[in-house]
Amino acid sequence: MGRILLYVVLIAAVSLVAVWVAEQPGDVRLIWRGYLVESSVSMLFVLVMACAVLLAFAYQVLNFVLSSPRLIQTTRRNRFRENAYRSLTRGMVAVAAGDIKAAKRAVRGTEGFLSGSPLHLLLTAQAAQLEGNELLARESFKAMLTDPESEFLGLRGLLVQSLRKGDKKTALALARRAFEINPRAEWVLTNLIDLETVAGNWPDAEQSVIAAQRANGIKPENARRRRAVLLYQRAQVALDQGDEKAARDLAKRSANLKADFVPAVVLASKLLASAGRLRRARKLIARAWQSAPHPELSAVLVEISKPLNDLSRIKILEPLMSLKPGNMEGHLALASASLDASLWGAAREHLGEAAKGIPDQRLYRLMARLEEGENQNDAAARQWLLKASRAPSEPAWKCRECGEISNNWVIQCYSCEGVDSFEWGRGTNGPNGGAADELLFAAPSKRA
C-alpha cells in the first residue's frame, strides 16, 4: 500500500512538472556547423529526458556485459558450495548409518569446494575409520591440528586411535594438550584421569579429578572414590620407599574419603596399629564394617589385636556382630574362630545363621570342619565338601568390565586394562572354577 501511494505521488509530481514546462513561453535556437535548429522549450525538455533514459539504459547494458564473467563465476561458486554442503550432510548421515560407499561418495563430493576445511577433514577421517583405513584417518586428524578451530576435534580423533592401539603414552600427551585447550570438556577429563592413573602419576591424576569435579564433569561420589584410590596408591608408593608416616597419612585420607574402600582401610589400620594407635585403627575398621562387611576387615582386626588364644580371638570379633547384626560375613568369621576354639555349639549356631543368606563354598567347608572336629565323622565331612564343590564360589575381587578374578584388589585389570574396575562380589561357580574339585580330595585345614 505504501509503495502504491509513493508511485502515485511521483507520477503526479512528474505530470505537474511537465505541465509547468509546457506552459512556459519561449523558443530555443541552436546553430551548429551552419545548421539552424529551432524548437520550443518543452520539446527540448523531452529530448533531454529521452537522452538521459537512453544513456542510463546504455550504462546498464555495458555494466552487465563487463560484470557478467564475475556474476557467472559467483553463481557457479554458490552452486558448488550448495552441492558441497549437501554432500557433506549426506556424508554425515552415511557415516552415522554405516554406509561406507555413500560416505566415500560424499567425501569426493566435498573435495572441490571444501577441500582442506575442518568439516571435509572430519568427514574424510570418519569415512576412513568406517572403511578401516586408520592411516588415512590419522592423516586427516593430524591435518585438523593446524587449524585452531578444528584442533580440539583432531586431538580427540587421535586420542581415540591411540587408545585403540594401546599407545597410552601418546594418548596421555594428546589428553594433556586437549586439557590446555578446553579444561572443562568431560571426555578430556575422563580420559586424562584414567591415563594419568595408568601412568602412575598419582598427584597429577588427583588434580585432574579435582578439576573434573569443579567442572561438574564427574559425580561427587565418583570423585571421592577415585581420589581415595589415588591416595591409596600414593600410600603404597610411600610404604615401598620406607616412609611409613607419609604412607599412614595418605592411607588415612583415603579411608576417610571412602569408608568402604577396603584396601585403604586395611592398610591404614595396619600402619596405625604399628604406630601404637590401635584404638584409632579399630574405629576405622568398625566404620568400614558398618558400610560394607568384608572378610579382610575381620582378618586385619584379628591381626592388629594380636589375640593370645582362640578364645580371645572370638572376643575381638564379637563387636562386629553388634555393628551389623545378622550379617553373613560376621557369622562366618565367628564360626571359624569358634571351630578353632573347639566351641562346636557356637560354631553350629553361627553357621546356621550364615546359611540364611546365600551359602557359598566357605560355609560348606566350615560345616565339613565341624563334622570332622565335633563328631569325627569323615563321611559327613566329605558330603559337605562335595556340596562345597557344587556351591557358588566364595566372593572375590572381580572386574566388572571383563569378569576377571583377582586374589587382591588392583587398580588396573591385567586382562582388559580397565581402571578401578575391580569390585567385591561372587566369582564363578565351583565346578567351573576348578579349585572346588580339588577341595573334595584335600585334607581339611585348620582354617576355612
Image (cartoon, grey):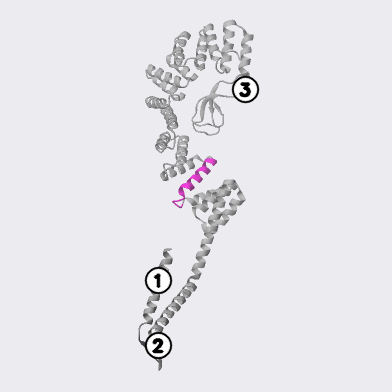
Image quadrant where residue 443 sits? top right
Q: Assign a secondary structure to mark 1.
A: helix
Disc 3 and disc 1 in contact, CB within 8 angstroms: no
Residue 119 visible, this orientation: yes
Per the image, the residue denoted by label 1 is 10
Callout 3: helix, strand or loop?
A: loop
Overall secondary structure of the magenta stretch?
A: helix
Q: Is residue 280 left or right of residue 417?
A: left
Spatial separation of the CA atoms under disc 3 and disc 1? 104 Å
Amino acid, disc 3: Gly
Q: Amino acid at mark 2?
A: Ser
Among the two numbered marks 3 and 2 on one chain, the one whose residue lies closer to the N terminus = 2
Mark 3 and mark 1 lie on one chain; the one further toward the N terminus is 1
* Residue 304 counted in the magenta span: no
Disc 2 from disc 1: Cα separation = 27 Å
Residue 39 numbered mark, or none: 2
Decide if residue 441 is in sight here: no
Residue 371: where, in percent of width, then height?
A: 59, 8
Pick whichever of labels 2 and 1 is earlier in the sequence.
1
**Nearest to the observer: residue 41 or residue 23:** 23
| Residue to which mark 3 is pinned | 434
Q: Residue furthest top?
A: 375
Note whether 168 is above or below 406 in the view shown. below
Along the viewing direction, whichever of 220 and 176 lies nearer the viewer: 220
Residue nearer the viewer, 155 or 102: 102
Q: Is residue 155 shown in magenta?
A: yes
Residue drawn where x is 51% and y is 66% of the image: 73
- Name the secondary structure under disc 2: strand
Going 43% across and 26% down the picture, which residue do you hit?
A: 258
Image quarter where the N terminus lies is: bottom left
Span highlighted in magenta in the image: 146-165
